[in-house]
Image (cartoon, coloured by chain):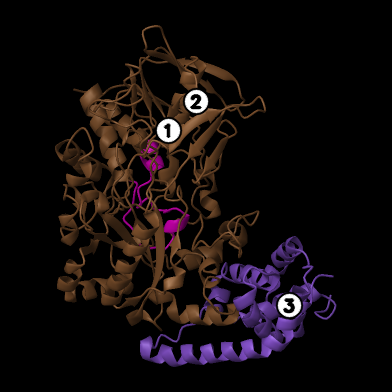
Chain colours: A brown, B purple
Amino acid sequence: MSGGVLVIGSGASGVAFAARLVAAGRPVTMLDVGRRGPRPAFPDADLPELKRRLDDPFAYFIGPADEALILPEEEGEEYYGFPPEKGHVFAGHEGLPWKARGFAPLFSFAAGGLAEAWTGGSYPFNEGELAGWPFGLDQLLPRYSAVAREIGITGAADDLARIMPLHEGLLEPVELDQHGLRLLAAYERKKEALAGLGFVMGRARLAVLTEDRGERRACDRLGRCLWGCPRGALYVPSLGLDALIGRPGFDYRPGHFVERFVPGPGGRVERVIARDQKGRELAIDCDELVLAAGTLASSRIYLASLRAEGAGAVELGGLMDNRQFLMPFVNLGMLGRRYEARSYQYHQLAMGLDLGGPMDYVHGLVTTLKTAMLHPVVQSLPFSMGIATRFFGEMHAALGLLNVNFSDSPRPENRLALEDAGDGGPARLVIDYRPEPGEDERVARVAGRFRKILRLLGALAPKGMSHLRPMGASVHYAGSLPMRAEGPEDSLDPEGRSRRFANLWVVDGSGFPTLPAKNLTFSLMANARRVAERSFLA
Amino acid sequence: MSAAGDPVAREARVLARVLGHDGPIDFLLERYRRLDAREGRPRRRDRRLQLAFLRAGSLGARIASAWAARWDRHGPLRRREVIMLALLECRPETMARVERCADGGPLAAWPRLVLWGCAEVVCLLLALPFFAPARFFGGRS
């Protein structure tokens, strides 16, 4: 290969960036490890039918090595786990050893990256949330619209528009189940009291098709979201990638693990060093390099490149992630009713809690997951398993899980660095994270407020069952190479270009200077498109 | 092999029954055996007693389970119960039996919930004289 635009990684941002360039006729080469999962079995079957038709349902739902079985453990309880079908999404790589303190990182080397396991939440940042950014909403809003038109985003012009801008291209929302209908009806009745608590609620904005579009089919409520939508209704980046593969000017090269890039004498990146599946080292030239491997993997490539150039002990501060807590609740009006397995499974409703400033905003998603495996939830009930199962049968339709995201701000002590692993292998990525002082009080205050809100909505959230997830669990990593109007050498300019290397851009979460509470994936795609248009197509 | 001569199969049948499934479990026995073998046998006396109660039958299992739900949530009985539930929920027919709902709404559900709550308390009271001494004075073998 000789030159051209080289993109590393096929996640949400890499695919959005490449798609924009290829559509404009600019050739792009994409290097990717690119692991793939199995093709969906019986794509038209709903979940009970799937269980009936599979030769070995245990292997499908629990895993060939029982890896999806969630047993009672001392370390704490999770209410659901990733199914075996998505095992490839979070499988590690021997080229990226790591050590973490205060952080539970997830990496992805899958085609499509981490967003292969996302829940489709597509919530645009507002002007206030972009206050710490070197550009305003005027640069992102048209890109939110463009991404929405391209991948399909559902939503409605409802109260959520007060906290997130309305953009073009919104499809009809997904159909609400009885659980969601009751919550929304209660919200409409108590709106005044809830507004006094700084609370708004509305239809989830989701990257889900509610109308057929080419090979992707509208959501048919098969209840299989957690295992991977077999109809392609829920957008995942591998769908965007597959649409790109074969298009003129797009050269996709899976099976490549990028170790580092090599700058030339003028401070310009000349080539990247990668290993193929057989472990052979390859040097691949480029004119312009775009890192889109995800915050942790892109930062590792950046650090390894500086290290190879003898830059000494460099570290990248400012790592961020959305702290999450899970608050199970019982929607009392749904007690003793049969649950609806045929519904969109992740979240049909979204909510926001305005606690003052934009970075104090807390974002909540009501997840029902009616078809998820029951054993992790049943074992968390405070009864013997036989009684817990009966309780669960009566409560299943009434159960909900409020997933609350907190914003994060950059702090230098939350850092990424490399150290020798001591085994002659690749250097180890070291991740250090300490929560903001006072986080416990903040979480407790918000939890109390949400409990009160849920009571007004006719739901009960038992106090002892809320669960603060470890830092890193939300997989909304950001901030290690932030975009700033002015900044140090190891940061990006407002167009996402490295200040140290003139032909290096970073379009993943590394470049986010702050991390609002809303799920970041939609903004990753919009920003990648923005960088493509302003730096490569202008 | 008969159920009497096959303690793991008996254990599995009792577990399935406690979880609400009375039908055949042949389709999951092989998988259950594998997971049971992986779990191994406990060394603590009170935990061995839990498994002995399980093998004694449904009532014994319910009593031991009520104890384990309070004071040994990560113990061997609870782990086996979770394994059985996970296996049962892989088939829609068994799942439907385990996860029953009369669909009568909240007013019909509350009396049932209260009744089950009472059953839980009774099992717990029956468990205390057996498991409390075994736990606090039993030690290991």
At x 64% / y 54%, what residue is drawn? A64
Residue B76 position, x and y percent, is: 70, 70
- For discs 3 and 2, the disc positioned in front in the rendered view: 3
Is there a contact, CB below 8 Å, between mark 3 and mark 2?
A: no
**Dot 1 amino acid type:** Ala
At x 38% / y 48%, what residue is drawn? A436
Highlighted magenta segment, given as a residue range: A215-242
**Dot 3 amino acid type:** Phe
Which quarter of the picture shows residue A176? bottom left
C-alpha distance separating marks 2 and 1: 9 Å
Which quarter of the picture shows residue B121? bottom right
**Dot 2 amino acid type:** Val
C-alpha distance separating marks 3 and 1: 54 Å
Q: What residue did someone put label 1 on? A: A293
Q: In the picture, which quadrant includes the N terminus of chain A?
A: top left
Q: How many marks?
A: 3
Viewer-closest of A244 and A167: A167
A533 displayed left or right of B28: left
A15 displayed left or right of B25: left
Q: What residue did someone put label 2 on? A: A258
Label 1 secondary element: loop
Determine if residue A452 is in view. yes
Reply yes or no: does residue A480 show up in magenta.
no
Is there a contact, CB below 8 Å, between mark 2 and mark 1?
A: yes
Q: Main secondary structure of the magenta part?
A: loop
Q: What residue did someone put label 3 on? A: B136
